[in-house]
Image (cartoon, rainbow, N blue to C red):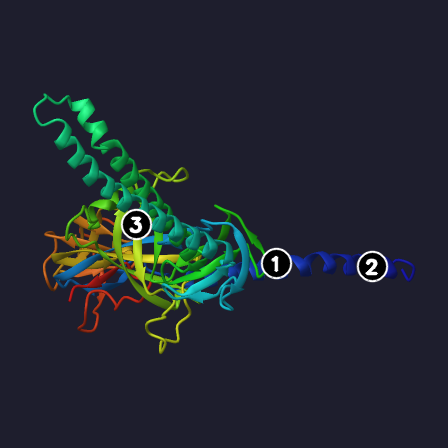
Amino acid sequence: MKEQKPANILTGRKSLKIVLPLAVLIVAVVVALYLASTAPKARRTPPVREAPLVEVLTVRHSSERVTVPAMGSVIPAREIMLKSQIAGDVVKINPRFTEGGRLKAGEEILRIDDRDYRLAVAEQRSAVVNAEYALKLEMGRQDVAKREWELLNKASPQKSLDSELALRKPHLEKAQADLEAVRAALQKAELDLTRTVVRAPFSCIVRTKNVDLGSRASSQDQLAELVGTDQYQVRASVPVDRLKWISIPSGGNDQGSKAHILYGNASGYERKGTVVRLLSDLEEEGRMARILIAVDDPLDLKSPENTRPPLLIGEYVRVEIEGPVLDGVVALPRSALRDGRSVWVAGDDDTLDMRTVDIAWRGETTVLVRNDLRDGEWIITTGLSAPVQGMKVRVNEPADGPSVTTPDKKEKHVPAK
């Protein structure tokens, strides 16, 4: 019996290792089932769809001026190649006659050695005196020949050819022609003498200079390139369909559209201009129309108190051309335009109204709408992911003010004055 006792103990321990885990598992399952059956259950409710919050602008009808934007470059309004009409050595030169130098109208630019031309004038004056002397002698001979002819041919018929020769009419005509010729030669010599002094034909700035003191100037040699300073022009490119908004003079007293020339760093400076001409051809790149805008006193020579920088030839500038005034329109930012031809209106019952509008003008940042909106209506400016006609919206009411913020210089329309 003492030998069987250890085997019973070993069997009991193995049974406990199997029964205890099963008991724990059964208890855990019972507890889990109890908790699942007694836990609170969530109630199902339909989802609540919240109306989107939108920003709006208040519709205000007003009179707005159309402004056509363009880009252009500055070119001379008057430019000449100054040439010498006579030959000679340059003996005097204006100290301001240098590249970038400014000259007034009629101011002396340079002087050519005039000694040969003074001698030519003296010679021609002597020739005129001789021709006048010869003419007076011939007129005296005319009187003598006339009396002799009358005495010799009182009773006989007179032939016209014989009469002319006897009365020395050809001699008189030659003497008169010789006098006219030498007088013309004298005028030519005096004109050449005046041409030894070269003067500025108009107020100008020297663009290029080709002669200096001591240079030999020949007839038709190019002395310099001069650019007028009274006026510059801006050659601007605009789309062909925008020409109907621009007033272009056709002659007479027609007045072209006014323009604002913006230039300098970030276009911080402005000058006034006037449209003067439409060029006859389109530009090769872009197929846009080209117009010329006149800018008076581009260097502020008549207004030296101005501190703005001058316009420079070749400078690239922005242009805003004033068009007509449109009455009874609503100015809206382009961001408020949907699909290029409609707007979203917030109705009195806070519903979305998708409305097609008549667009009178499209600017870069602003559109002008007419006839389709009422004062006081709200235009939605907030984007919606899935807009549907009649959907509910929540309006963030704007403060009482204009429908569009005051435009800065980049705005392409300005309120009419």
Q: Can you say whether 174 is above or below 189 in the image?
A: above
The answer to which image quadrant residue 305 occupies is bottom left
Residue beneath label 2, please? 10
At x 23% / y 48%, what residue is drawn? Answer: 388
Residue 196 point in image, percent of width and height:
46, 57
For marks 2 and 3, the one nearer the N-term is: 2
Looking at the image, can residue 249 be seen? Answer: yes
Badge 3 amino acid: Ala
Residue 301 point in image, percent of width and height:
36, 70
Quadrant position of the C terminus in the picture = bottom left
Which is more toward the observer, 318 or 358? 318
Residue beneath label 3, please? 386
Residue 207 point in image, percent of width and height:
48, 57
For marks 3 and 1, the one nearer the N-term is: 1
Q: Which mark is residue 25?
A: 1
For marks 2 and 1, the one nearer the N-term is: 2
At x 30% / y 48%, what residue is drawn? Answer: 132
Badge 2 amino acid: Leu
Badge 1 amino acid: Leu
Which is more toward the observer, 288 or 52? 288
Could you classify mark 1 by the number of other residues whose Cα lies within 10 Å: few (under 14), some (14-19), or many (20 or more)? few
Residue occupying the far left of the picture = 155
Q: Are marks 3 and 1 in contact (CB under 8 Å)?
A: no
SS for dot 1? helix
SS for dot 3? loop
Could you classify mark 3 by the number of other residues whose Cα lies within 10 Å: few (under 14), some (14-19), or many (20 or more)? few
The answer to which image quadrant residue 157 occupies is top left
Looking at the image, can residue 264 be seen? Answer: no
Q: Are marks 2 and 3 in contact (CB under 8 Å)?
A: no
From the image, state whether disc 2 or disc 1 is nearer to you: 1
